[in-house]
Image: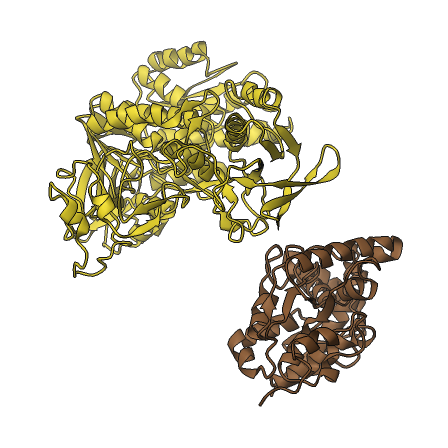
Chain colours: A yellow, B brown
Amino acid sequence: MNNRVGVFICHCGKNIARTVDVEALRKEAAGLPGVEWAEDDMYLCSDPGQQLIRERIAEQNLDAVVVAACSPTLHTTTFRRAVESAGVNPFRLEIANIREQCSWVHPGTAETTHKAAALVRSGVEKARRTQPLEPIHVGLQRAVVVIGGGVAGIQAALDIAEAGYPVHLVEQGPNLGGRMAQLSETFPTLDCSSCILTPKMVEVSHHPLVTIHTLAEVTDVEGSIGNFQVRIRQQPRYVIAEGCTGCGDCVPACPQVVPGEFDRGLGARKAIYIPFPQAVPFTYTLDREHCLNQGPLIICDRCAQACEPRAIDFDQQPSEELVEAGAIVLATGCDTLPLSHFREYGHDRHPDVIDGLMFERLLSASGPTHGEIRRPSDHRVPKSIAFVQCAGSRDPERGKAYCSQICCMYTAKHALLYHHAVPDGKVYIFYIDIRAGGKGYEEFVERVRAEDGINYIRGKVAKLIPKDGKLEVWGVDTLLGEQVKVEVDLVVLATALVPSQGIQELARVARVAIDGDGFLSEAHPKLRPVESQTRGIYLAGTAQGPRDISATVAHAAGAASKVLGLFSHDELVEEPTIARVNEALCRGCSFCVSVCPYDAISLHEGTAHVNETLCRGCGACTPACFAAALGPRGFEDDQILAQIRALAC
Amino acid sequence: MTSLAYYPGCSLKRFASGCEIAGLEAARRLGIELVELERWNCCGTVFSMSSGERMHHLGSLRNLVRVQEAGYPEVVTMCAMCQNTLRQVNNEVRGDGDSLAMMNRFMDEEPAYRGEVEVLHYLTLLDRLGSEAIAARVERPLTGLRVAPYYGCTLVRPPSAGIDDPEDPNIMERLLEALGAKVVRDPMRVECCGAYMGVSKPGTINVRASAIHGSARNSGAEALATMCPLCAHNLDAVGPAPDEPALVVFYFTQLVALALGAKPEQCLAATQRVDPRPLLSTKGLLEEPQP
């Protein structure tokens, strides 16, 4: 109550001074109780403006400051630093928002100045009552859990481990590699995808600070930034990793043939398998779902008989591990809209309707056709192909409203690779627009269009009609305004990217937000693209939204650098304006526990306890407490009531 | 016997009477009494939906009021176009309280429509009974008859008024299998028959009918089955160009009635241009069912 308050009023050029009579406001402020000094300035946020505040604090021996200027979301930090450098506790700064809440939205009348005065008065009443607050220091666990073993997860894990911090890389599937491992060549440079990915997979698997958990899932996340406890559930591989030499003798012994997921069902694998030759870890996996041994009784042990190092263990059980981590990176990747979504194209009736990822497998030297493009129905080399872009993308009524970002480019690449493999083959690309906004991308598409003479048709495909072993594509050419009918041997749909399965469950467990399309939400679309809305949890790659490989790697490196920024401190420094419990008043009713949106409050021995790193100081608990026992520091009841009274008069 | 409200529509009382006679007989044989509404009027046809003018939609709304008056929760239609128009108008007033209030005020001589009636197509009714229940009632299985269902537009489009997936419907296929017929999946089954284009450009219909008949024939069909009087008119009464072969065009209800054991003269009212009797006779489907 005895604080010596200084009031500083900003003109903000003409932004405030145009409608508020600053001189009248200054005079009124100067006469308010507790105000020792009142002054105005053209731009308080400028260096000279801040210097003015610092000088007056020293001269007038001020111990609380009111800045009447723009919204506190803009310059709170600026002015807190200014007052702190002059020896005033930064939480004794109050901002009266006389721009967004006054000068911008009202005409230049006396009433506007009157309102500005009320806002200043309210700020002064708060400032008179403020107490010094000190930041909270919390310990920090310098280790990371990266969820997802695709290129995003690998990149983030490597960057963090290279800086010297331990990483747990958790992958749901039996091997690392993700979507990128399934691709043949990459646009626009036509680098072989596995040739550039394999060294990274090898590097991450050999890194002494990286622990790889394959066939593993995160089932629970406790704690908060700096101190997470992550529960990792390990599914049995039924092959002892240390024992398996990768010789592959088990494969011919296995009688069970099933469609291979890695080849998108275009090729077959055995129940004991390794999905691709460069797999990391190079350990075979026994898929018990398709194994003859469904129960505890072992009726077929041919793989175990064939295994010289005796690495097969039918009795392996799931296990769990609890890992301490200061940060988590979510790099769970993406899937594609299933072909069954497109009933007008009838994939279930026409095996020669495939998606872009299947075409990648047909192009891949380690794919089901060893890199020869052969269509699924009769294994003939197709003499004509129609590519359908935007299959499910940019289609809010029947698919996804968003652009999947990569399809224009990979379709151009597919057309080029096919044209090189089958020079007399005919290609039709149906498109809405060509979106080639990357370095070298437009040039690549232009090259495909001009040099390879690929026929781009602007329009959508309505349906596919089977005709004499071919598919008649019914579409429209919107540039010529004509209907188009072409007969082709193979149709490739550039299906929309969608979040990978299980993302919702993981988001629930990790308490991160997801957007309307199911992708993980970033903290700010422009300025905080690698942070989730939950502190300490970062996003990498297509889990956050469709993007290509280079953007994914950049995004993952960004997430890693955010983690390293966090780890560059010995401890976390948290804002002190969080909830505090008056234990003498708390009755342990736990009502506050149920209203806290951050799960920051728990009951300990009958008394509410606030987790200082989880609490964001939102104040939801304050009205929930019947005993008035808790609320955020810096927003005490007497301060708030005084502010309201000052506004009302 | 279950009783349900039944809205026939104009076409079924005139040139598409074969559809109704067979449909009512088939329903009776399935233990369903279709009670024709009193004082029903024209639905307005889908043509009335081409304008957003609410006054053009009153015809359908009045019919829904008739159903409400009679105390039925649902109304069954056989005509694809009537079901489409009734359903679209029903959806429109249900989704927009202001529109419903305005139209009720306009029809001040009528009780206010409350938006509670469900419009049910005859095929959906059969589907709800289930393939097994229908198969159990079949007395004259359509064995060996190769039929291509033809949906056209109004049974499936727009999706909000359709009875099945607009691109890949299956309801007629399911029911035909229950009747013992050989189902032929014709890729043209959801293409337009030409609709009202016959009025302004008469040649169009022959072109469309040729394409649809040709596609079904190439797919191995001996007959088409439809639930739309306009499609039947265009595909059968107008048909392909005179020098081109034409398949038999059945109303779906005719096949149901035949399979359930109705007398051929009940199911095959003389409204078909291409006589179905020779085809049915070769399959032994004009004979009395074996007990």
* Residue A445: image location, x then y, percent: 57, 23
* Residue A107: image location, x then y, percent: 65, 29
| Residue extending farthest bottom | B291
Between A221 and A600, the residue placed more toward the observer is A221
Which quadrant holds residue B97?
bottom right
Which quadrant holds residue B227?
bottom right
**Point 22% across, 29% down: residue:** A205
**Up/down of B189 relative to A482, above or below:** below
Which quadrant holds residue A281?
top left
Between B277 and A34, the residue placed more toward the observer is B277
Locate residue B47 relative to residue A81 in the image: left or right: right
Locate residue A362 relative to residue B212 in the image: left or right: left
**Up/down of A443 relative to A522, above or below:** above
| Residue extending farthest top | A48
Count of residue discs: 0
* Residue B209: image location, x then y, percent: 77, 58
Between A466 and B27, the residue placed more toward the observer is A466
Res. A95 in view: no
**Point 32% across, 23% down: residue:** A561
* Residue A473: image location, x then y, percent: 63, 43
Locate residue A304 relative to residue A359 in the image: left or right: left
Res. A425 in view: yes
**Point 37% across, 13% down: residue:** A54
Q: Quadrant of the N terminus of chain A?
A: top left
Locate residue A525 relative to residue B137 in the image: left or right: left
| Residue extending farthest left | A309
**Point 24% across, 24% down: residue:** A203
